[in-house]
Image: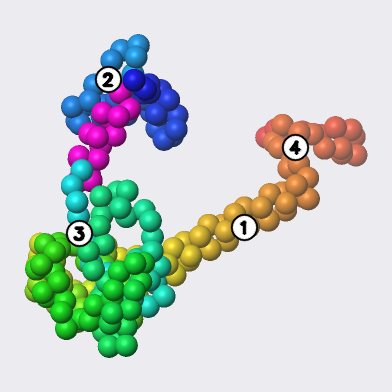
Amino acid sequence: MPTVSSEELAAAAGVNSAKLRKDFSYLGSYGTRGVGYDVEYLVYQISRELGLTQDWPVVIVGIGNLGAALANYGGFASRGFRVAALIDADPAMAGKPVAGMPVQHTDDLEKIISDNGVSIGVIATPAGAAQQVCDRLVAAGVTSILNFAPTVLTVPDGVDVRKVDLSIELQILAFHEQRKAGEESAADADAAAGPAVTKNQHRKGPDGDVPAVMPA
């Protein structure tokens, strides 16, 4: 039976092992002193707390380039998320297979949500259509939305929205690159300037060495 110690997990996660053990205690997993944690059971406990031990049907609305890429992403199923339907407003897309599934028209959105018991929706539409799609998803019973559209959605209380804006993520990376470039320039300037004179260093005067700070 494979096991892992709290020290190994802490080192991999970059956290303190004592804090990790305390956090795990909230899961009901205390491990065994000198042995560690049963890996399979620990994965199950974490997955259970994250809600990943059940099947979560998901609909993706907006099957353009981004929506199609999301539909083809293989990581959903391994985390408990099943793409139940692909939906698009373009009549020409209806019936076309994407990631092995036929695209359905938005006219059937409410029925699709009801028939599949969907509570999570993914919006990958243009910004101008996102709010209307969001309103229809919420009215149909969806209570969690992952929004890839470049706009802010308005939702009622009880509905959770997570926004994914790739341009913002790139801006964050650009900020870090700019900061690193500034730090490197400052370091180069310091190196070129040479060592600074400290208060304990002496300088030459007309009568020999003179303290940098003359006594009063």
In the image, residue 197 above or below residue 68? above
**Whether residue 69 is situated above or below residue 19 in the rendered picture:** below
Would residue 209 be counted in the magenta stretch? no
Question: Which of disc 2 and disc 1 is earlier in sequence?
Answer: 2
Choose the circle earlier in sequence order: 4 or 1: 1
Is residue 116 something one can see in this rendering?
Answer: yes
The secondary element bearing badge 4 is classed as loop
Looking at the image, is mark 4 or mark 1 nearer the viewer? 1
Gap in angstroms between the C-alphas marked 1 and 3: 47 Å
Asked if disc 3 and disc 2 are in contact, CB closer than 8 Å, the reply is: no
Name the residue tied to disc 1.
Answer: 182
The crowd level at tag 2 (other Cα within 10 Å; few <14, some 14-19, many 20+) is: some
Per the image, label 1 sits on a secondary structure element best described as helix
Q: Which mark is residue 31?
A: 2
Check disc 3 and report the residue beneath it: 57
Q: Earlier in the sequence, mark 3 or mark 2?
A: 2
Q: CA distance from mark 1 to mark 2?
A: 46 Å
Q: Locate residue 85: give its quadrant.
A: bottom left
Judge by depth and name the residue closer to the eye, 30 or 39: 39
Q: Amino acid at mark 3?
A: Pro
- Which mark's residue is nearer the viewer, 1 or 3? 3
On screen, residue 94 above or below 2: below
Q: Which residues are magenta?
A: 38-52
Question: Label 3, label 4: how many angstroms apart (C-alpha)?
Answer: 75 Å
Find residue 212 and name its label: 4
